[in-house]
Image: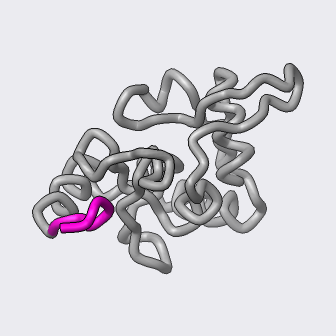
Amino acid sequence: MTSNSISTDLRKLVLQRASGCCEYCLIHQDYSIYTHEVDHIIAVKHGGVTTEDNLAFSCLSCNRYKGSDFATIDQLSQEIVPLFNPRRQVWNEHFFLKGARIEGRTQIGQGTARLLQFNLPNRMLERQVLISQNLYP
């Protein structure tokens, strides 16, 4: 097995642990156009390993915007800020919902929300429709 090959059993564990929801934006796989993916929180190219502690369940949008990034630059302080890590951090400590918007409570939450483009109009519309049907979060 190569360093970034993810076994079927490990994929199942990641999916079950996340209860089918993206661990970044909380959208459930059943309500996404595309199948969610297993994301290396710290990318293999940065030395991340393929273990359950370094994997997260991610919707296509979050995974594409995140790419291999694990940090961003805070827009106010210009400091390097790590992205939200669902294995080590609690979502509600870094984010909150304001209607269909996902807002950051912390630098980590703010940077992650900005980099992963949580609040693009199409993503907010998708969440608003799901909220109106009691399907989100």
For the point 72% across and 27% down, which residue is it?
80
Q: x and y percent of residue 37 in the render?
A: 39, 67
Query: Of 50 and 1, which appears nearest the observer?
Result: 1
Residue 10 in which image quadrant: bottom left
Q: x and y percent of residue 31 in the render?
A: 44, 70
Residue 9 in which image quadrant: bottom left
134 sits left or right of 118 in the view: left
Q: Is residue 99 above or below residue 38?
A: above
Query: Of 117 and 10, which appears nearest the observer?
Result: 10
Residue 96 in which image quadrant: top right
Q: Is residue 108 above or below residue 131?
A: above
Q: x and y percent of residue 27 in the render?
A: 47, 57
Can you see residue 134? Answer: no
Q: Main secondary structure of the magenta part?
A: loop
Q: Is residue 100 magenta?
A: no
Magenta segment boundaries in residue numbering: 1-7
For the point 67% across and 27% down, which residue is it?
81
